[in-house]
Amino acid sequence: MTDKSHHAPQGDGIHRIYLLIDILVISACLYLSCGGDLAVLRDREGLLRAFFGAITVLLLAGMHMYKTERALSIAAESANVVKAALAAFIITSAAAALTGIHEVFYIQFASHAALMTAVLCLWRAFKRLAVRYLVSRGLNNLDTLIVGSCGPSKRLVGELDKRPYLGFRVVGLIISDGRPAEECGKYILPSGIGDLENVIHRNFVDEIFVDEEIDAGTIEDIAGTAREHNIGMKVFGSASSPEMSMLKKYDIGDISVIEFCERKKLEAVFFTKRLMDLCISLALSVLLMPVFALISVAIMLDDGWPPFYVNKRRGGNGRVFNLYKFRTMKRGSELMKEGLRGLNEVESPLFKIKDDPRITRLGRFLRRYSLDELPQLLNVIKNDMSLVGPRPLVLEEIDENDLAQLKRLRVKSGMTGLWQVRGRNDVSFNRFIKWDLWYVSNFSPGLDLKIMFMTIPIVIKGRGAY
């Protein structure tokens, strides 16, 4: 199973930030061209300069320049900015001519347009360099599966490895021509195209590259699976291929790539969810600092050091992270676990004992009111978890051959969720898996708020917790 350590969805939020920075740059240039006198903006010349800026932004938006196209070079992005500014200059000049403005304006306006275009190109070049640096170090990488014959697939792997700033992290190859594994590189998987769905879930695939040489029916079948699971799919082939040269969207080295089907745009939902998580968790962390300190001291007085318990969990997109809790069991409790397995009171891989002898007196109180889970606010701040999401299972509780369990890992684990508001520890394993799957398919910021409000009375009552 792939461990995604830096995966996060790209967001509409960053696109809005790009738009805002463009507007700020244009406003700053407008201010400079007016000599700092904002009153000038009220006359005809000032309004024409503002009109030029607005038209430039609209043209850039029409050219999709507020999207994060990683394959776009700095030169190509700068060229697009120049094209948009030139078109806006022509439109504004035509508008100025219709108003009968003085010829001197055109000289001043040309200087303003040149300054604005240069600054837009400079900040965008800096932005692209920064994005490339972050992506090449793992930010927002897309776990990528390649399906095709050995030679072309191996070449594509080489081109992607040379361009880590594109953010395609290869997790496997499914070879369609039956060539020996040793000839096709380190990423080859023992699976065939018929096992595609299992491969997708076990490796948390975000993007699939398919060789153009595969027959059309198989490509369409792969596309259907990709659409069903909201995975992007691209077809790759030689840049000299007539079909690819006619349809190509961009090149990766000497390989042409076209978009066959794109992922559904959930960026706005993810951005809002993350923003809500961050604001609420930061606010609660500050407000509850005295409670954190009091519980920590109480644990140390009751059973000594340490007050915290750290455990490995597998969260969103298969990422392994350290989950933080207040310690509620006696020191060395993990060593006692094997001897108590016969007392397990829940089904499947979960291990729960209502009157677990390892739990301390204070620990029973903390568990009853879920106070032991407060340190998970740090996990939320660190982006390991969300306030609401599927239950975070320990590593040995996850069956990697169970597709239902793997599907629930498509989003980050939560401090609370439907399993919490529907019975907590009284819920059967299969039932909370079903609720987690329903949440993964229907999550939204509105649903998160509803679940959070539903959690409060359940925690206060202490129902279903032990």
Image: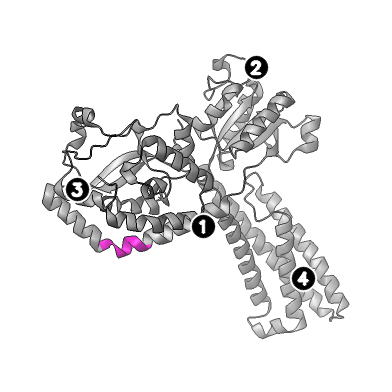
Name the N-terminal-most of marks 3 and 2. Answer: 2
Residue drawn at the location 85% of the way across and 71% of the way down: 94
Residue drawn at the location 63% of the way across and 59% of the way down: 122
Nearest-to-viewer mark from 2 and 4: 2
Residue drawn at the location 15% of the way across and 45% of the way down: 360
The vertical placement of 377 against 309, above or below, is below
- Residue tagged 4: 110
Is residue 304 visible from the viewing direction of this image? no
For residue 363, which numbered disc appears in the image? 3
* Residue type for callout 4: Ala
- Is 194 within the magenta? no
* Residue type for callout 2: Asp
For residue 272, which numbered disc appears in the image? 1
Nearest-to-viewer mark from 1 and 3: 3
Left or right of 327, for residue 12: right
Estimate the spatial distance between the alpha carbons at disc 3 and disc 2, rounded to whole Å.
59 Å
Q: Which of the image's four quarters has the C terminus? A: top left
For residue 80, which numbered disc appears in the image? none
* Residue type for callout 1: Thr
Name the N-terminal-most of marks 1 and 2. Answer: 2
Name the N-terminal-most of marks 1 and 3. Answer: 1
Estimate the spatial distance between the alpha carbons at disc 3 and disc 4, rounded to whole Å.
72 Å
Cβ atoms at labels 2 and 4 below 8 Å apart:
no
Name the N-terminal-most of marks 3 and 4. Answer: 4
Estimate the spatial distance between the alpha carbons at disc 1 and disc 2, rounded to whole Å.
44 Å
For residue 177, which numbered disc appears in the image? 2
- Is 288 within the magenta? yes
The vertical placement of 133 against 97, above or below, is above
The range drawn in magenta is 283-289
Nearest-to-viewer mark from 3 and 2: 3
Classify residue 96 by image quadrant. bottom right
